[in-house]
Image (spheres, coloured by chain):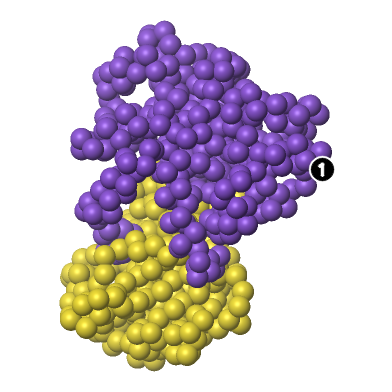
Chain colours: A yellow, B purple
Amino acid sequence: MHEALCGGGLRLRITPIIVRLHSSIPDFADGLLRLYGDHEILEPSGFADFHISLASPGGLRRWLRPQVNFIFDGFRPFKPLPREQAYPMFEWGLNWCVAQHFHHVISIHSAAIARGGSAVILPAPPGSGKSTLCAGLVARGWRLLSDELALIRPEDLQLVPCPRPISLKNQSIDVIGDFAMDCVIGLCYRDTHKGDVAHMKPPAESVERAAEFADPRWIIFPRYASGMDAVFSPVRKAEAVVRLAENGFNYAKLGPFAFHVLNRLVDQCQVFDFVYSRLEEAVDLFDSLFQT
Amino acid sequence: MVVAMQHEALRHELAILGEIFSSLQTYIILLKGAAYVACCLAAGRGRSFSDIDILIPHGRLGDVEAALMLKGWVSTHRNAYDQRYYRQWMHEIPPMVHIQRGTALDVHHALTPPTSRIRADTAAMLANARDIPGWPGFKALAPEDMVLHSATHLFLEGELEAGLRDLFDLEALIGEFSASDPQFLDRLVGRAEAVGLERPLFYALRYVQRILGVEFPAELLARTSDFKPSFPPLVLMDALFDRALLPHHSTCQDALTPAALFALYVRGHWLRMPAHLLIVHLLRKAFRREEESSPEGPEKAVRG
């Protein structure tokens, strides 16, 4: 893997996309190896949706407080980060690539999980505990569709999975570490602008089933609140459309078309707010939701 | 779908511009993408926009700029050098941006810069402009002139960021017009000679054929072969355009591509400006500290 990354590029299938990756930063290669072990490495020559490079800048910053740049199709969309954050930069950058370019779907900032063929969309702004809840549910058998981007096909409202490492922040790194003893968690990257960040490897089964779409049946807005008992509260559908739009990446770009898709989506789903503090209790409640 | 939204936004902007210009009692000629969409041409289908290009009579420039500013458009490139570059040397006022909607508007008053070494008979082309059905007050260039203007824009400008897109425009325009009118290609050649745009037409046909594989009739190519440059030699222009008209991506480039792009950039300016101004201009651009658009961290950009 290291040679491919430094040389002609590593072509990796991260369904539904193919990424060509270049990097000579060893930490980045290690991160990939640890967390993308179940993703398919493809023949080096062939199509790639995104050409991504994690590269050291030229000049002084190669050596002095070294940095890393995220380069996409020859462009540098972001300011550089400290070199040790190359791996999280890749994850953030790839989210951006998908959010910026996937306009054949409606993309919402949310987690998405599934059981059987039925899916839950968990839209939430940062800090709501969405990723912790998502990681907990996935550790207890729910299929991971995405921890960051719900991709909704306008033609049939099905969710397009894109299972990738789940990003965990600060305390939730330890919480999930204790909750999911047999899950693989990558290195902890300290003092990023989001605090401490680590990633949980997606279950092999989620990656294997990445080509299977899922039918959204629930839209649940999660919120972590310390000390609170876990509870679902119904949300009015009109309000749900607005809150989904607020979390939309390409809602404004798609305009009325996206509005109508979200209306249809909300019509076919049950919609709740969900408050929780204890992960075990939350997971049990989700299981019972699925059974009803 | 994104393009459909953009076209809707374009129609909205055109409606607003139509009101402004009808009160000024002057026509607007739509150029390039805006014209293709308003005229429902194949070249407009699926085309995305970064700005709207319009052409207005030179004598009304002051009135038009004032009216636009009253309705919320502001000039970009506010330093004195850029203002002079655009107004005195090029054929447009600096691009304007609407302060609320963010729409970008390029207001031209000629089809080629006054200082250009290849001068089109703009007056003849404007005189032949047609009304656009469904858009009162708006005109578009006649089909032959639309093709010639597109060719001039692509092969005389130095910035080839959208080079392949412009080549597809040419192919779509020529294809659509010649399909509905068997005399079109003949008239196109005659018109190029009449308005002094033989060279851009030569390049247009050559590179649409070379890069997009379109076959033109042999007699057309025979007629236009006289339009080829004696200097620089065609083999050099092929080497430059074969590279510059491909997508600007590492998978489509070779070691000579950066040099080719630079050479065409300089050539574009040389064609548009007299030599003594060109050197000054290039030096200024090389040494001026450009304000880089400040990129955010990736996590912020995803609202994450």
Q: Quadrant of residue A86?
A: bottom left
Residue in the picture at 38% in, 68% down: A71
Residue in the picture at 38% in, 32% down: B90
B57 vs A155, nearest the viewer = B57
For badge 1, the amino acid type reads Ala
- Using the image, determine if residue A147 lies above or below residue B223: below
Q: Quadrant of residue B103?
A: top left
- Tag 1, which chain? B
Residue B155 drawn at (x, y percent)? 54, 43
Q: Mark 1 points at which residue?
A: B218
Residue B182 drawn at (x, y percent)? 81, 29
Residue B279 drawn at (x, y percent)? 32, 47
- Using the image, determine if residue A47 lies above or below residue A235: below
Residue A19 drawn at (x, y percent)? 50, 72
* Left or right of A182, for residue A267: right
- Using the image, determine if residue B246 lies above or below residue A57: above
Q: Tell me the quadrant of the picture where the N terminus of chain B can be found.
A: top right
Residue in the picture at 37% in, 14% down: B59
Q: Residue furthest front?
A: B230
- Using the image, determine if residue B110 lies above or below residue A67: above
A33 vs B192, nearest the viewer = B192
